Amino acid sequence: MLGFTTLRCHNQYLQEHSINVALLSMTLGNRVGYTKVELTDLGLAALFPNVEKCAIALDILNKPCKFSADDWEILHTLPTQDVLMLVTLRGIGHVPLHMAGVSFEHHMNYDLF
């Protein structure tokens, strides 16, 4: 949870977005019949894909114009950085594979960037 507190300090919108995504995911999971354990994993997986943005400067995250090539180079590291931060926060033995997958794939487009 410390990583999540860091997210709020860095950017309150991202924290609120993360909470909304987690709640919506758990609501949908409940609707299709997930168990409580599955809902917990789903909620956590949905909660953390924006934590790594704490490492990105706010002037890049809040840029009002198009990103430069240098900005995109930084932003393209987000999927990997997200999984690394999740492993750092929870420990390698405590990150379910599907949670790491959600974190990694959250920022990827069809072209894998």
Image: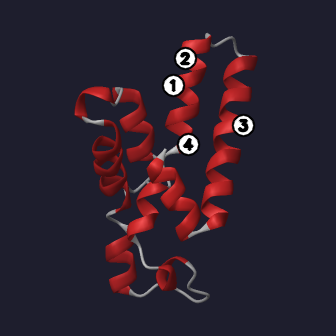
- Marks 3 and 4, Cα distance to the nearest angstrom? 10 Å
Task: Name the kind of residue labelled 1 in the image.
Answer: Asp
The residue that mark 3 highlights is: 24
In the rendered image, the vertical position of residue 53 relative to residue 73, given as above or below: above
In the rendered image, the vertical position of residue 41 relative to residue 73, given as above or below: above
Say which label, 4 or 2, has the lower sequence index. Answer: 2
Say which label, 2 or 3, has the lower sequence index. Answer: 3
The residue that mark 2 highlights is: 38
Q: Quadrant of residue 15?
A: bottom right
Mark 2 and mark 3 residues within 8 Å of each other at the beta carbon: no
Colour setup of the view: secondary structure
Residue found 66% across the figure and 55% down from its top: 17
The residue that mark 1 highlights is: 41
Quadrant where the image shows the C terminus: bottom left
Q: Is residue 40 left or right of residue 86?
A: right
Task: Name the kind of residue labelled 2 in the image.
Answer: Glu
- Marks 2 and 3, Cα distance to the nearest angstrom? 14 Å
The residue that mark 4 highlights is: 47
In the rendered image, the vertical position of residue 20 relative to residue 14, given as above or below: above
